[in-house]
């Protein structure tokens, strides 16, 4: 053996009786292995001309801000019920614009909150929208155009201009409800000008979804808009499917230079399979095929039929007063029935199944009036709100 290898082995042998190896001995062994390795020539910097690194010419990359503000929402009504810049709202507020939801192909509230810090989507027993605001669970703190929409169902986003998510206590502005926050959906409204937009998406498991957005001016004072949606899709789960459709016509009418009337009607029909997933075994998912459905999928259903009518009267005066009166009338008819897989026996041959159902049929009528006064006094802009 050569000298370096012998030195390494002697060093190891001399320390065996002490039950430890100092750092210098380990390093010495590594040096000995490198000295004796057939790869030793590769450690030298004697590269041939072909192996030397190639120096590239210097280049620069420059860019500039495009000015695209499609994802930027500088102000909101949700936090204070006044047209306030987001930077001046003394609460944590996130706004997702319709363009962002469209570009990222969001179709549900659960997909919307995926990008919102402090808010997590809950399964909601697969029959309703339910979210966790900073640890506070809620299935009722939902609003549409600032008015409560608290019946438990699963909402779509096809007709939304934006979604505003407020985190933190909200009783002073929104009345009863949870202390965690609220989700407000602002629907698209008819505007002057023309617009034609149609989208279609398809995917695995028979997924198909189509949306329509048409806007048209009737004259210099009135405009109409129509949003519609249809979706039919399956799932990797046995017997699980979803079919929903919605339509939302709206009308904007300028009754006077400072008075605007906006009308909305929405019909949503959502039918899907209530799927509670697979059971567990010893704290882990049971070793069954991932597509296994426990119970009868044909007898596990969620049905929601929603009719919403909203009207907004917005009037301004030269004295700085602004009156906003909004009315919402809603008719909700929903029901569900599902199977819940329970405990597994010790032989892993039987699983306990329980089933239950529920139905909600409700009519809502809300009216709220906000009076805002704006003035500049003493070099300070003041905004007073009453309602």
Image: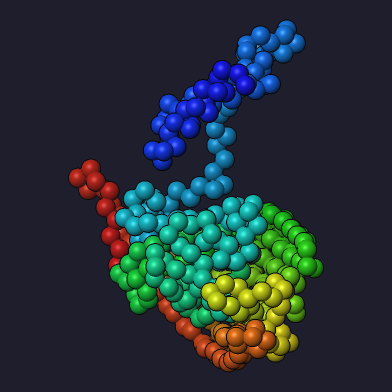
Q: Quadrant of residue 348?
A: bottom right
Q: Is residue 236 above or below residue 150?
A: above
**Quick check: 12 left or right of 385?**
right
The residue that appears at 67% across and 65% down in the rendered structure is 227
Q: Measured from the top left, where is residue 232 in percent x and y? A: 75, 72
Q: Position of residue 36 (x, y in %)?
A: 62, 21
- Return the x and y of residue 111 as percentages of the image width and height: 58, 62
The colour scheme used here is: rainbow
Residues 375 and 43: in front is 43
For the C terminus, which image quadrant?
Answer: bottom left
Image quarter for residue 299? bottom right
Q: Quadrant of the N terminus?
A: top right
Can residue 373 be seen in this snapshot?
Answer: yes
Q: Is residue 132 above or below residue 93?
A: below
In the image, taking residue 291 as reference, residue 267 lies left or right, namely: left
> Is residue 144 visible from the viewing direction of this image?
no
Q: Nearer the viewer, residue 111 or 229?
A: 111
Number of numbered labels in the structure image: 0
Residue located at (47% from left, 28% from top): 11
Task: Name the residue: 51% across, 87% down.
Answer: 363
Q: Residue 186's x, y, as percent?
A: 52, 63
Q: Nearer the viewer, residue 55 or 67?
A: 55
């Amino acid at each position: 053996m050569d000298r370096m290898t012998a030195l390494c082995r002697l060093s190891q042998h001399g320390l065996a009786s002490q039950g430890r190896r100092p750092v210098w001995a380990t390093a010495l062994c590594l040096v000995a292995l490198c000295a004796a390795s057939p790869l030793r020539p590769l450690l030298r910097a004697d590269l041939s001309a072909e192996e030397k690194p190639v120096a590239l010419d210097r280049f620069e990359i420059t860019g500039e801000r495009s000015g695209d503000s499609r994802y930027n929402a500088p102000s909101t009504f949700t936090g204070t019920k006044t047209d306030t810049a987001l930077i001046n709202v003394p609460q944590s507020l996130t706004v997702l614009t319709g363009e962002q939801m469209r570009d990222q192909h969001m179709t549900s509230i659960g997909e919307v909150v995926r990008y919102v810090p402090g808010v997590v989507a809950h399964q909601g027993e697969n029959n309703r929208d339910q979210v966790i605001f900073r640890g506070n669970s809620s299935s009722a703190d939902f609003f549409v155009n600032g008015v409560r929409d608290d019946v438990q169902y699963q909402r779509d986003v096809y007709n939304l201009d934006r979604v505003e998510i407020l985190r933190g206590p909200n009783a002073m502005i929104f009345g009863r409800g949870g202390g965690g926050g609220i989700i407000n959906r602002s629907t698209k409204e008819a505007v002057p000008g023309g617009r034609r937009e149609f989208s279609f998406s398809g995917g695995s498991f028979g997924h198909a979804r189509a949306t329509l957005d048409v806007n048209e001016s009737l004259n210099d004072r009135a405009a109409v808009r129509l949003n519609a949606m249809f979706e039919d899709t399956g799932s990797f789960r046995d017997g699980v499917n979803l079919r929903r459709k919605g339509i939302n016509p709206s009308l904007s009418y300028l009754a006077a230079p400072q008075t605007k009337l906006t009308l909305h009607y929405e019909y949503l029909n959502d039918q899907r399979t209530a799927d509670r997933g697979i059971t567990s075994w010893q704290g882990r998912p049971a070793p069954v095929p991932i597509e296994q459905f426990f119970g009868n999928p044909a007898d596990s259903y969620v049905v929601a039929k929603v009719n919403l009518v909203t009207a907004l009267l917005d009037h301004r005066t030269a004295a700085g007063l602004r009156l906003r009166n909004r009315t919402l009338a809603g008719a909700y008819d929903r029901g569900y029935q599902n199977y819940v897989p329970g405990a597994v026996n010790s032989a892993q041959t039987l699983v306990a199944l329980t089933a239950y159902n529920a139905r909600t049929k409700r009519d809502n009528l809300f009216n709220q009036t906000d009076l805002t006064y704006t003035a500049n006094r003493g070099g300070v802009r003041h905004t007073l709100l009453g309602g």
